[in-house]
Amino acid sequence: NLDVSTLVDSDGGLIDRSIYTDEGLYKQEMRRIFARSWLFLAHTSQFKKPGDFFTTFMGEDPIIVTMDKKKSIRAYLNSCRHRGVRVCRADAGATKMFTCTYHGWSFDLEGALQSVPNEQAYPEDFDKKDWGLIEVPNVAIYKGLIFANWDPKAEPLEDALGDMRYYMDAMLDRDPEGTEVIGGVMKWVLEGNWKLAAEQFATDWYHVNMSHASALMVLSPTGKGPKADIAATPGRQFVSPKGHGAGFPTHPKSRFDAKAVHEHYDYAALRERLGDAAVEGPMTTGHATVFPSFSYLPVNGSIRVWHPKGPDKMEVWAWILVDKSMPDEVKDAQRLYNLRTFGPSGIFEADDGENWSEVQAISHGFVTNNVPLNFQMGIGSEREDGTYPGQTSELYSDAAGRGFYRHWATLMNEPAWHENKNK
Ligand code: FES
């Protein structure tokens, strides 16, 4: 159990780079962050009938998400109880049983072991009831987003999200019919620690005008790109005590969504539904992270998970979210806009991946690894602003980054549910 107190100074805004490179810390993250946090699995629109399934990961644990016979969403460890191979190797599909391809054990949609070839050769006290798939004890849905948590005593998802729900609603609750995902799940690999991406989406508006300057010029109606005086952009950054974060400009002109999407929205109705502040703030060109590894962009419906794959690598899985009642041509405009901006080769996405890989590539150097990183922008500026829920800071601030790492350090230094049997 590694003490991370000296690695994260969230009050002073200093972060030790070894949190991105150390193998021991990475293993501790699997136990103390990913085995006890609410993790995004999938969207409800991916499951229409019993037997529909989707395979994903919680940390590095392989997971089957499926709809059971009673139409409940359930999640299982995707590992056969016999010798451990995955019982489902497809990315998604529909089935009646999950049959292991190694020796043929078969599990039903409720995770129960139903058939064992040559069962008569097992001892008399062998009972199939004891050898079902390991089920994730908590699965909960927030406005179409399915999350799961391994901690049997986890606080309810809505409590864990807290004020973050208000910021999420600006994307999830525009349409009384809700949202759905369209197209497939885009997956790509980046050479970089998962926290570099999660933290940036929580807190970092600062990089936008520099890193994305050329992309902004392409999108700018004047062709001149961003203004030099970035600090003048009005906006807020939400800082959650649970490690979540969201940043957004607070000006209706700050939207840069697809034209067809912009024209589709009835802004008066949205103001009625969500409130003026949500329409002028988190519904605009914002970015956000739900701790630890789920991020989204309200402006183009990109929802994504940063799957950890070792300290130096992450796999990005991204979906395109649209409002259910959008006409097909508007959904398609959203899809194309999403791909061109934040798809795997999108003009913005490529800039971000380049930055994270660059940080990671040099962080193993001995001296480099001993020079702390700076998260001091806007230190002490967190407050209740009277408009947006919870604590907020200026748009250009590292407040949510400090909050992200504060929560990360707290969890890393606390025994998790599986380490304390009396909990
Ligand atoms: Fe699955 Fe043997 S490993 S049946």
Image (cartoon, grey):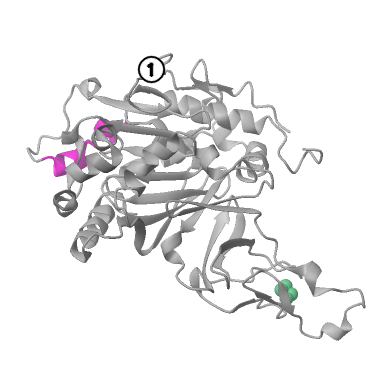
In x, y percent, where is residue 262? 17, 48
- Quick one: quadrant of the C terminus? top right
Left or right: 176 in relation to 73 = left
Name the chief secondary structure element in magenta. helix
Range of magenta residues: 207-220
Magenta stretch: includes residue 209: yes
Residue sitting at 48 percent across and 19 percent down? 13
In x, y percent, where is residue 227? 16, 27
Q: How many labels does the image show?
A: 1
Going by the picture, which residue comes out furthest to the front? 272
* Helix, strand or loop for disc 1: loop
In x, y percent, where is residue 67? 54, 68
Residue sitting at 22 percent across and 65 percent down? 328
The correct choice, above or below, for 289 with respect to 241 in the image is below
The correct choice, above or below, for 395 with respect to 360 in the image is above
Does residue 136 appear anywhere in the picture? yes
Going by the picture, which residue comes out furthest to the right? 124
Residue sitting at 57 percent across and 37 percent down? 21
Magenta stretch: includes residue 108: no
The correct choice, above or below, for 116 with respect to 401 in the image is below
Nearest the viewer among 174 and 322 is 174
Per the image, the residue denoted by label 1 is: 378
In x, y percent, where is residue 6? 63, 20
The correct choice, above or below, for 364 with respect to 189 in the image is above
